[in-house]
Image (spheres, coloured by chain):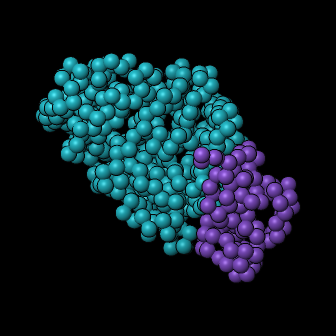
Chain colours: A cyan, B purple
């Protein structure tokens, strides 16, 4: 397989995007209608936002990492005018990263209609500015950060979908790329196995602390990451689901633990800890739905996220395309319009795991080179930003890993 | 423990492919695609092993060929799900009134 994947958009920080979208961010639920109206009919515009009026450090870090994401070429931030989160400050950070950026308050512009008008005008200006500062460069596997998530797992996920992604992750890491997996609440029961994958003894300690927090979280909120659809699909316990979910990490050593909105300090395989810390509000909530995990993965700078679903899922994502993989051939046939890849061929002995992983690498290369993934082409842009609490100190500590 | 790669009816013969071995046994009941079939006699309270690790423990004894799921296997940590409907997976402990 050639090392060259295609061409990317070079950003000032050296990272390369595979898309060049204009990101519209709203800073409170009250601004969401106007923000979405600004995006209507604009195929290069993706919309995300935070619904809370009271600000939240986690949500802000997530918005900032989206505003400066390699797949984002320009940024428009829309506020109402009362909320804590300051749209002007987000636009400032985006502008400092070399991205054309604008922001406004709806109250100052005169309401819904005039706010939408202001936003549409801003898009025109941003596009003009983008046209003059866009630099295309060759894109290699080593330039890619790829996230992986699963949702709607069934008995095939641990046998085909996730193992194929795991093989693919091995290949990506061997080519110098960065692979990020998360869902520590789906590692319950695998404490020793997780530690055994650590690159160093320091990382082993980090992984263990992360595991133990996930276990405390599940006990405290009395919630395990296993759902009726998982049971209907043949998974009986969280331990069984965990074994399947963990297979997507492949077999390479884990280099360290990332916190939400933190970039991997180097290439290789990394674990993202998206579970809230337990000192504040007694955890709060994590893992409310698949989209939350996908957003956390994209916020690490991942240009693509692989999404493994046995039962079938119809979500997509803003900023970074989601590639839909199922290990269930029946699901693939039934939901072909939504599925990018059938790993079920491994279970029917049509392909070996290695052959299927190579085929998946080709699918990833196509998407990286510009071919829209299925959810991307359909127009899925689901996003989810919630109140969550994670210490920033740990992010700084994690950077030395 | 083996995972079914197709739906099967009671009395049907199942071929089990393991690493370097093939064996056959009869299903004692209908088992759906993606669900699990017991290969050995499992005593109540014993661990149930898949992928070489315990994925839970038996809440009832099971014969080879029986369906292993929520009705006879329970997580060591998650206390909620063992009472759920084994066919649909639906929660039975939530009141909708």
Image quarter where the C terminus of chain A lies is: top right
- Report x, y in % for residue A78: 27, 27
At 76% from the left and 57% from the top, the residue drawn is B73
At 30% from the left and 38% from the top, the residue drawn is A47
- Residue A229 can be seen in this image: yes
Q: Which residue lies furthest to the bottom in this view?
A: B12
- Report x, y in % for residue B53: 74, 53
Q: Residue A36: which quarter of the image?
A: top left
- Report x, y in % for residue A43: 22, 46
Q: In this orientation, which residue lies closer to the viewer: A382 or A169?
A: A382
Q: In this orientation, which residue lies closer to the viewer: A341 or B80?
A: B80
Above or below: residue A370 compared with residue B14: above
Above or below: residue A118 compared with residue A19: above
* Image position of A33 (left or right of A342): left
* Image position of B66 (left or right of A110): right
Q: Residue A157: which quarter of the image?
A: bottom right
Q: In this figure, what is the number of numbered marks?
A: 0
Image quarter where the N terminus of chain A lies is: bottom left
- Report x, y in % for residue A44: 23, 43
- Residue A175 can be seen in this image: no
Q: Residue A318: which quarter of the image?
A: top left
At 67% from the left and 78% from the top, the residue drawn is B9
């Amino acid at each position: 397989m050639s090392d060259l994947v295609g061409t990317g958009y070079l950003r000032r920080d050296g990272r390369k995007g595979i898309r060049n979208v204009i990101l519209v961010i709203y800073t409170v639920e009250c601004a969401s209608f106007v923000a979405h109206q600004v995006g209507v009919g604009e195929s290069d515009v993706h919309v995300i936002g935070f619904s809370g009026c009271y600000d939240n450090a986690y949500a802000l870090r997530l918005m900032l990492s989206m505003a400066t994401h390699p797949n984002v070429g320009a940024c428009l931030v829309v506020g109402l005018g009362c909320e804590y989160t300051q749209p002007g400050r987000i636009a400032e950070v985006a502008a400092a990263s070399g991205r054309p950026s604008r922001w406004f308050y709806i109250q100052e512009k005169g309401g819904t209609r005039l706010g939408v008008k202001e936003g549409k005008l801003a898009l025109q200006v941003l596009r003009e500015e983008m046209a003059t500062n866009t630099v295309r460069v060759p894109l290699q596997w080593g330039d890619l950060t790829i996230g992986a998530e699963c949702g709607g797992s069934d008995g095939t996920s641990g046998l085909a979908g996730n193992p194929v992604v795991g093989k693919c992750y091995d290949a990506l890491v061997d080519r110098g790329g960065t692979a990020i997996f998360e869902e520590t609440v789906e590692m319950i029961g695998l404490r020793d196995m997780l530690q055994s994958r650590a690159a160093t003894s320091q990382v082993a300690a980090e992984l263990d602390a992360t595991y133990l927090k996930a276990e405390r979280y599940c006990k405290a909120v009395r919630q395990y990451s296993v759902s009726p659809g998982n049971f209907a699909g043949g998974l009986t316990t969280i331990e069984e689901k965990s074994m399947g979910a963990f297979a997507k990490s492949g077999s390479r050593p884990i280099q360290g633990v990332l916190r939400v909105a933190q970039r991997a300090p180097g290439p290789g395989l990394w674990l993202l800890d998206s579970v809230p810390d337990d000192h504040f509000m007694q955890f709060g909530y994590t893992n409310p739905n698949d989209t939350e995990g996908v957003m956390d993965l994209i916020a690490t700078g991942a240009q693509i996220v692989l999404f493994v679903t046995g039962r079938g899922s119809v979500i997509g994502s803003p900023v970074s395309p989601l590639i839909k993989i199922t290990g269930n051939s029946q699901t693939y046939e039934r939901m072909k319009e939504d599925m990018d890849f059938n790993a079920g061929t491994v279970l029917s002995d049509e392909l070996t795991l290695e052959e299927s992983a190579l085929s998946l690498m080709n699918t990833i290369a196509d998407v990286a080179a510009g071919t829209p993934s299925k959810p991307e082409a359909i127009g899925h842009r689901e996003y989810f930003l919630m109140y969550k609490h994670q210490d920033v100190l740990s992010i700084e500590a994690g950077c030395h890993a | 423990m083996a995972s079914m790669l197709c739906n099967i009816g009671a009395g049907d013969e199942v071929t089990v492919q393991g690493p370097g071995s093939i064996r056959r046994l009869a299903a004692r009941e209908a088992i759906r695609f993606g669900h699990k079939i017991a290969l050995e006699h499992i005593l109540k309270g014993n661990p149930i092993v898949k992928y070489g690790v315990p994925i839970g423990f038996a809440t009832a004894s099971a014969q080879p060929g029986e369906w292993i799921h929520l009705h006879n296997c329970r997580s060591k940590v998650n206390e909620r799900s063992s009472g759920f409907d084994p066919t649909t997976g639906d929660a039975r402990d939530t009141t909708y009134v």
